[in-house]
Image: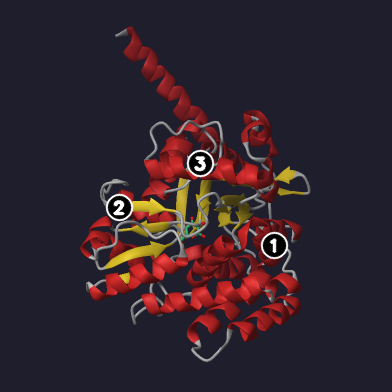
């Protein structure tokens, strides 16, 4: 009885404190697929348990292209949301324009610098101050495979070289399935291309080409081979790729229409949401030559500069929640990523998450850890857009040679500087 009273009194106290500082904050994000929405909802629930109100501002569209367009127009009209999902160098761009607030208080109180990987924390700071909170680490280089389709096609394992991949694709096609599920959107094309290129070129080459945008690397034989391999993959896809969303492509693997998809591990969120278990119902395997590599993509929530003290408090509370060990575990299990806090144990995570963390550690030691260009971690927004245009045009134009595409890459990124 005593305990019940004590609990009730405690609950009242929490509510009172909550109400004194409670506020509504609008959160812009693009987590709208089945798995993504489940993950986002966990954050909403936690924030609301603190007494605040989450005003959902979800803008559908993989990789956030549409969300970023909407964010710009809201900011230009002087009405940005309090919180927005923004990534990589784009956080700096918003910070330098004076749009973002400062959440150092939360970072200091919880000791973020002690447990966040430095390279990742750097994206979230503007002039040395935290303006955003990182949520997760997604790995881009994955193949998601349906083992039954592979078996029915006489393919014993997910191919480990591109030659083996194309051989397997022929068998899968003959058996009546689509070898590679894909959605023809520029960011998905770029996702597949960067995975092919990192395997063929390795970590140093990737950094030269896709971080430094070095003209020599961009026109090298390695680049030509990567472009040609990428274009050949088009023949392993179906005829209806144009405009298809990534999660629709994932569902083709889930329901056994297609054998494989090359996609970051938010795709795993779809398998998880469908109640499937890796190693039994589906496979997660690194694409050819990328087993010890890791193209990373970290989602962050950036805090806009707000005047209202309650909203500022809600931003700090949200930031602190995001990096709490509990939330890191539950959110990332639903999202398909691994915790951005390297001190959160993965005991309850599935085999793909464990493999991801292992690859992260090996890649960090061996130089195979690279920022994803396709997911806004490597170059400026305009340079990324320039690369997307060339890659997508090349992919869709049967007459464009790899040499022409490589030359165009050089001039496009130069013009976008
Ligand atoms: C990525 C983002 C992921 C996931 C994916 C598909 O860029 O980091 O969180 O949402 O796009 O939309």
Q: Secondary structure at mark 1?
A: loop
Gap in Å between the C-alphas at discs 1 and 3? 23 Å
Residue that numbered label 3 is attached to: 357
Q: Toward the viewer: 74 or 348? A: 348
Q: Residue at x 45, y 34 (%)?
A: 346
Q: Report if the beta carbon of the residue with label 1 is closer than 8 angstroms to ligand 1.
A: no
**Counting residues from the N terminus, which is met first, the one under dot 1 or under dot 3?**
1
State the image coordinates of residue 107 (x, y, percent, origin top left).
66, 35
Asked if residue 114 can be seen in this view, the reply is yes
Confirm whether residue 181 shows in the render: no
Residue with the mark numbered 1:
211
Q: Quadrant of the C terminus?
A: bottom right
In the rendered image, which quarter is residue 156 located in? bottom left
Mark carried by residue 113: none
Furthest residue in direction bottom, as rendered? 399
For this orientation, the residue located farthest to the right is 127
Q: Position of residue 25 (x, y in %)?
A: 52, 49
User: Is the Cβ of the residue at disc 1 closer than 8 Å to that at disc 2?
Assistant: no
Residue 393 lies, with reference to residue 188, above or below; the image says below
Q: Is mark 3 within 8 Å of ligand 1?
A: no
Give the vertical position of 409 relative to 163 (above or below).
below
Residue 169 occupies which quadrant of the picture? bottom left
Above or below, comparing residue 327 to residue 154 in the picture: above
**Left or right for 32, reference 391:** left
Q: Residue at x 49, y 89 (%)?
A: 398
The circle drawn on residue 282 is 2
Q: Quadrant of the N terminus?
A: top left
**Is tag 2's residue or tag 3's residue first in the polypeptide sequence?**
2
């Amino acid at each position: 009885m005593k305990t019940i009273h004590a609990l009730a009194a405690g609950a009242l106290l929490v509510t009172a404190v909550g109400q004194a500082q409670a506020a509504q904050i609008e959160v812009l994000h693009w987590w709208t697929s089945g798995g993504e929405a489940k993950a986002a909802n966990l954050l909403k629930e936690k924030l609301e348990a603190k007494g605040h109100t989450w005003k959902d501002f979800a803008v559908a569209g993989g990789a956030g292209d549409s969300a970023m367009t909407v964010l710009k127009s809201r900011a230009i009209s002087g009405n940005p949301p309090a919180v927005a999902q923004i990534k990589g160098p784009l956080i700096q761009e918003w910070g330098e324009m004076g749009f973002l607030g400062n959440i150092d208080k939360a970072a200091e109180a919880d000791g973020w610098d002690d447990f966040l990987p430095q390279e990742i924390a750097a994206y979230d700071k503007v002039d040395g101050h935290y303006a955003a909170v990182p949520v997760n680490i997604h790995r881009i280089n994955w193949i998601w495979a349906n083992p039954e389709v592979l078996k029915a096609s006489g393919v014993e394992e997910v191919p480990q070289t591109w030659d083996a991949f194309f051989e397997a694709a022929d068998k899968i096609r003959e058996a009546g399935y689509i070898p590679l599920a894909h959605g023809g959107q520029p960011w998905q094309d770029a996702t597949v291309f960067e995975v092919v290129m990192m395997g063929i070129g390795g970590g140093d080459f990737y950094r030269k080409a896709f971080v430094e945008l070095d003209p020599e690397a961009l026109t090298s034989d390695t680049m030509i081979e990567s472009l040609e391999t990428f274009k050949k993959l088009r023949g392993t896809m179906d005829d209806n790729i144009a405009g298809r969303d990534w999660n629709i492509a994932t569902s083709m693997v889930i329901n056994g229409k297609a054998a494989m998809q090359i996609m970051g591990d938010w795709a795993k969120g779809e398998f998880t949401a469908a109640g499937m278990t890796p190693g039994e119902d589906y496979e997660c395997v690194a694409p050819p030559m990328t087993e010890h590599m890791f193209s990373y993509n970290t989602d962050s929530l950036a805090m806009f500069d707000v005047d209202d003290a309650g909203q500022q408090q809600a931003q700090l509370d949200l930031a602190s929640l995001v990096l709490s060990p509990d939330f890191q575990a539950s959110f990332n299990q639903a999202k398909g990523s691994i915790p951005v806090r390297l001190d959160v144990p993965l005991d309850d995570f599935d085999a793909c998450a464990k493999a991801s963390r292992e690859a992260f550690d090996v890649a960090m030691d061996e130089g195979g850890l690279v920022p994803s260009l396709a997911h806004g971690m490597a170059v400026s927004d305009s340079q990324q857009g320039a690369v997307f245009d060339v890659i997508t045009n090349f992919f869709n134009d049967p007459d464009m040679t790899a040499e022409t595409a490589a030359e165009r890459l050089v001039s496009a990124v130069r013009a976008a500087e």
